[in-house]
Image: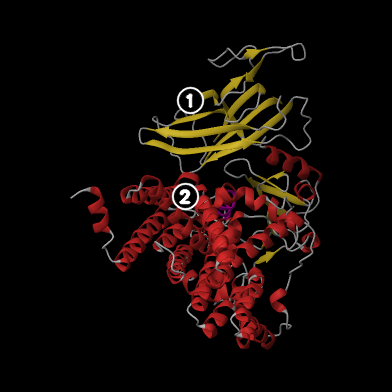
Amino acid sequence: MNFNSFIKSLSDISERRLMYALIAVILIIDMAILVLSNGYSGSSYSVMHYQFARWAFTNPENFLNSWANPLFTLLAAPFALLGFKSLQLMNIILGILSGYFAYRVAKELKMKAPLLALVICSFTPVFMITFYGGTTEVMFAFVAILGTFLLIKDKFLAGALVISLLPLIRLDGLILLPVYAIYFIRWRKTKFLPLLLSASVFYSLIGMLFGKDLFWLFDGVKIWSDSIFGHGTFYQFILRSPGFFGIPNEIFFVTGLVAGLWLYIRERKEYSQEFVLVVLPFVIYFLAHSFAWWQGIGNSQGLSRYMAAIVPFMAVMATRGLYLFAKMFFIIFKSEAVRIGALILGFASIIHIPFAIQNYPVSLSSTDWALSDAAEYIKAKGLDTEKIYYTDPSVFYFLNKNPKCNSYIEVKNAEQLKTMQNSDLLLFDVAFAALKGINVDSVLYSSGFKLIQVFNPEIPTYTFGKPYFVALLERSDADSLTQFENQKIVTGSNKSYVTLVKYDFDSSTPTDTITVSTSKINRTAYFRIPKRNRKYMVSEIKLDTINPIQPITLKVSYRQFRKTSDENLRYFVEAVSNEGTLYKRVFEVGTPAQANPDEWHDISFTLILHNIEVTPELTIRTGFWNKRKGEFLIDDYKVEVVVK
């Protein structure tokens, strides 16, 4: 049997059987990642949605909370009762179902190889990573593509009712209602138009029965609000789309979009369904979020995960693009084997891309580790039964506590801090404190708040231009010594350190001394990092004789002169043993906000290595990585470890 005959025999396999096989493989991969992951995507917002659903049966008002999206809370609550993993499982199921209905839509639109839509949807990076969070985008995507499928099948009543659910899952579902209204008008089914608002009207009336006003679904919504989270260019989502859609998907999607638009122009009647029900929802949603981030309105944060909500539409369009990509090779080489080979190549690139640009299994983010450490400290000290004022409710996920119990009080503004009594605890983080108008420094260095502990992220992280951290404080009588003691805790001067690496480049230098030099401006020696992509000042450190605290906490400090003002240097830390690489992080080191680019400035940051056991075989590897083409001068470099 020659290759072409073998390929032809494969085409005899039932499409339905292949679909079941693909769903089984996708489910196995997703479940394996779920089991191996110890974290989640979506940061604090995932945890907040989980907590609204987890405690909804204890606090029924959660079912009618506009921020939490009431329908999402209702459907997620049974899953959340079994834990966060169960909620992630719900997202996996909905994600695969989204891919299935993307396949069904592609099939109804008579596209070639419609099963590609299932694969593209399931392995699009921004969609796949969202499976492992608690946010609303995956459920939104499922309902949106299901509504499109029902309308293509001419099930107008069911389609209208399903689409009406979108604003109750994400309020920006209102963006898509006019798009679907166009379809009903185009097909002269205007009698179904009122049903597009049916779910919102129903929930509004339910809320009124429980004392809410008619427009409670819009509580807290300020469309033309200040740019709380900042803003960016109108093209930001376009520029970042290869990162969250994946370059192969982007190529196939653009090819399919252009081909679809061309077909619509040539044969408008035949392709109008696809244009209104697939292309327009994607384009309108994408442009609406681009506009919101550009103008800084609607509290948009410009997050990539917003685009997960429209991935099934992208997958349908990319299906045509991938098929045309493969067909181009057939036209050129006149060989069915080459066409199938090109199809397999595209297929493989789609599956490969999320694992190439994202980290699986999913681990806790740097900031989530700070919240986790704060929770562990509170439990270890028996403080979880005390009265705690808090800014970020995510910490109660790690405490496994209901954030709405009587002893836990959410801080909503700075004025509320004045109502605290002596011995009350305050747990605040930089991000949510800024959103609630709390001046971090005024609390940290207040004589009326005693700082108990500061919890740093795993690697340096900035939010609203300031280093992120979580602080635990106790309300106390005003004392002049309190500010001094707080300062010591913030700077870490109350801890004991052992120096692991120290280079002043005068009396001590690294083994690579070629780039150590002096200048007329700087008479003392320094280390020059040239414009080359490589690692510098790599140190290998043993800790088995030092007795460091757990988790291992490193403090890195140095002076830097940045000769290329538009580039940042990277720093890396690794933990290796006989078992291989146990831990690896690489991050950009930003310069202080007030730093003059023409002067030396001091840089200091903390690295926290969790779940790393100190053994004689353990080696910690640190150093700089000049991945880009910047040039830097380094002086007075030091690495220390916190010891007991």
Q: Tell me the CA gap for discs 2 and 1.
A: 32 Å
Is 320 on the left-hand or right-hand side of 68? Answer: left
Q: Is residue 342 left or right of residue 429?
A: left
The residues colored magenta run: 370-378
Mark in the foreground, 2 or 1:
2
The one nearer the camera, 273 or 253, is 273
- Label for residue 135? none
Instruction: Please determine whether, in this image, residue 563 is positioned above or below residue 451.
Output: above
Q: Is residue 593 left or right of residue 266?
A: right
Amino acid tagged 2:
Pro
Q: Which mark is residue 540?
A: 1
Q: Nearer the viewer, residue 302 or 372?
A: 302
- Callout 2: helix, strand or loop? helix
Main SS class of the magenta portion in the image = helix
Residue at 63% x, 23% y: name it: 637
Q: Looking at the image, which residue is at 39% across and 62% down?
A: 115
The answer to whether residue 15 is visible is yes
- Is-magenta flag for residue 411? no
Q: Position of residue 591 (x, y in %)?
A: 71, 34
Vertical placement of 477 versus 93: above or below?
Answer: above
Marking on residue 354: 2
Q: Is residue 374 magenta?
A: yes
Mark 1 is on which residue type?
A: Glu
Q: Which part of the image, by quadrant, shows the C terminus?
A: top right
- Residue 187, how many percent across, how many down? 58, 81
Task: From the top left corner, tell me how far across and down residue 498 is, in percent.
Answer: 57, 28
